[in-house]
Image (cartoon, helix red, strand yellow):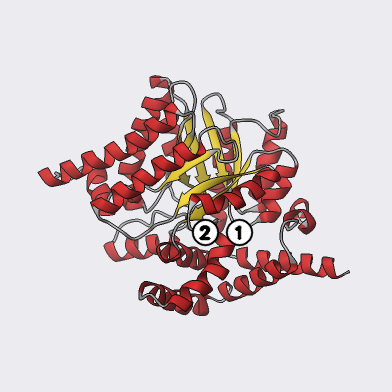
Amino acid sequence: MPIFNDTKVAFADKSDAQLRKAYWMFKMIEQPALTSLGTSVLNFTVHNNFPFVTGIVKSTLFEQFCGGETREESMKVVKQLFKRGVGSIFDYSIEGKEDEETFDAVCKEIKDIIRFSVGNPAIPFIVFKPTAFGRIDLYEAVGKGAELTSSQKEEWTRVVKRFDEVCKLCHENNKKVMIDAEETWMQDAADQLCEEMMEKYNQEKPIVWNTIQMYRTGRLEYMEENLQRAREKNYFIGYKIVRGAYMEKERARAAEKGYADPIQPTKEASDKNYNAGIDFVMNHLDKVSAFFGTHNEISSELIMDKMKEKSLENGNPNIYFGQLYGMSDNISFYLSDKGYNVAKYLPYGPVKDVVPYLTRRARENTSVAGQTGRELGLIKKELERRRK
């Protein structure tokens, strides 16, 4: 949409050299075959300690999409974003590990982020993934109501304890925490845990926020049910509303195992469902707050229009917009410039450990129609503007 075309505002903090590097990177990501091959090679070389490759990754993909290797290192980006009214959400992006030691270490890291960010308005949310605290197979078993072994019961008790410790600490320190959504087959158990935490810690305001993937079927119905439960039990709801990121994996698994595809049939259906999610929130602001995670310009403008219809001020505390660091700066900085609440997901962690996240992000960008092309067009437009 035209309102998000101001590249001077979008890239005010970027040098010509940074823009050229970003252009080259998105150009590589734009090609699915190259992305698939590149990410496979990247995972192999980094995990086999090819030091020169780690250096290349840090100065390219990592620099574009991550804040730094530590929270302290990332604060330079946090401060730069906040100067322009954009908050940061530290995302400790360690993926692919499934042992109790790692789960405990990640839980400790999340709690350290909470303490680190207390009193800092530049870091408005804490975030974690359910599978950072427990095995995906365990979530699946719990969600299906399977009979757990005694060791699985103990394991699940530890998962619940990690959730509770983080949510409790956020409640004590007045920090909002978003719990990411993941694959559908583990999500029922994660949703149930989120509901328990909301009931416990959202009595006065939304501290715990669940994530709703609108490319899924049945999510509007779920939100309606949850709202009814919240009214009955008198707690507030916080939602991060996104389209979703696991479409190919979900469809392949549904076909393989012979169950109904849980994903909306078309991109248009997903968009319609997302926009229905916007309406749901706007109609229930007495109980529901939302963080609209979207890189879609039409949805972003629709949220703004709905806020105007409801006579809500731009900075209404119940409504946030969010994008990923390194992407959609044209949306983020336009919104912050107009006084809306905006925050970017800011991944961080050791380069080697963050590579699975980076390669997943690259593949997702390749599969999102038009996203990479849009980034390229905006960068090109700004470079041309600066040459005039």
Quickly name the residue at label 1: 326
For residue 337, above or below residue 287: below
Q: Which mark is residue 106?
A: none
Q: Which quadrant of the figure has residue 40?
A: bottom left
The disc labelled 2 sits on which kind of residue?
A: Thr
Mark 1 to mark 2 CA distance (whole Å): 27 Å
What kind of element bears circle 1?
loop
Q: Which residue is farthest front?
A: 72
Q: Nearer the viewer, residue 46 or 336?
A: 46
Q: Which mark is residue 266?
A: 2
Q: Residue at x 58, y 30 (%)?
A: 283
Q: Quadrant location of the C terminus?
A: bottom right
For residue 263, above or below residue 359: above
Can the viewer see residue 36 in this picture? no
Q: Residue at x 30, y 49 (%)?
A: 103
- Image position, residue 300 (x, y; %): 66, 47
Q: Which quadrant of the figure has residue 164?
A: top left
